[in-house]
Amino acid sequence: MTQVLVPTARWARWVENFERSHGPASYDVRDGALHGVADDGSTVVARLPLGASYDGPAEPTAFVAAAGVPDDWGVLLVRKGGFAMARLAGTALGESKTGQRHVQGRTKAGGQSQQRFARRRDNQARQAYEAAADHAARILGGLRGPLVTGGDHGAVEEVLEDPRLRGVVRVEPWLAVPDPRRSVLEGAVADAQALVVEVVNA
């Protein structure tokens, strides 16, 4: 299975290419998603952005017409090297923040030196996550809509353990991103608004 993020503006072309490669497809709606089976047995499952459920006609054009973004939602990206987050109203970017923190790299030294470096690295990572949590509580606290996350799973979990963020609702897709910078955040915001499409080629 392959998962791809398809911007809504490219969906019609994507469906056209899929059916050109695999033959005409028949569609049905199940579990809040559009399911398609092509002549050669290849399958596609398409889901709306931000965890929304689809219950409309079993037809690609109607499906993409139902895609939209809520009035209040967010993106949170965390890795050891930094964090980035944004709160959005529909497609409009509201408050956002990016930050970089130095976390010691691994050392080849052994014995006590290695242990000392490991402790220092862990302390630096914890301080970075605490800083990210403080900004996230300010920007994403009280979020009414969904939150898309990405970066490093453990780092995101650390930040979201903050009691001030307990109410947020995370949705797919998980975004695999490099150390967050402004451009990475902007790309993640765009990816969060794309259709989540799973393809199994026959």
Image (spheres, rainbow, N blue to C red):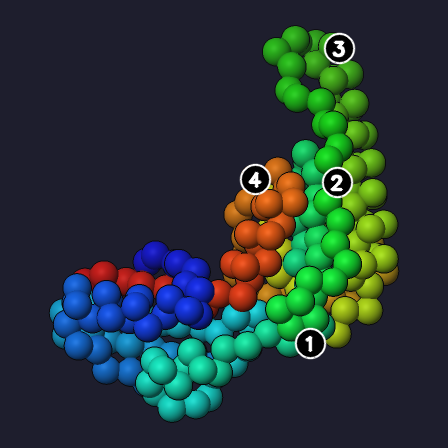
In contact (CB < 8 Å): disc 4 and disc 3: no
Q: Residue at x 42, y 69 (%)?
A: 9
**Which is more N-terminal, label 3 or label 2?**
2
Q: Amino acid at mark 1?
A: Asp
Q: Amino acid at mark 3?
A: Gln
User: Secondary structure beneath disc 4?
Assistant: loop
Q: Mark 2 to mark 3: distance in Å?
A: 31 Å
| Residue under label 3 | 112
Q: Amino acid at mark 2?
A: Gly
Q: Nearer the viewer, mark 4 or mark 1?
A: 1
| Residue under label 4 | 178
User: Secondary structure beneath disc 2?
Assistant: strand
Which of the two residues, 30 or 151, is positioned nearer the viewer here? 151
Q: Which mark is residue 71?
A: 1
User: Secondary structure beneath disc 3?
Assistant: helix
Query: Is 177 located above or below residue 114 in the figure?
Result: below
Q: Amino acid at mark 4?
A: Pro
Q: Residue at x 59, y 58 (%)?
A: 189
Q: State which quarter of the image contains the N terminus.
A: bottom left
Residue 186 left/right relative to 18: right
Which of the two residues, 21 or 90, is positioned nearer the viewer here? 90
User: Secondary structure beneath disc 1?
Assistant: loop
Q: Mark 3 to mark 1: distance in Å?
A: 53 Å
**Which is more N-terminal, label 1 or label 3?**
1
Query: Is 156 located above or below residue 195 in the figure?
Result: above
| Quadrant of the rendered image containing residue 169 | bottom right
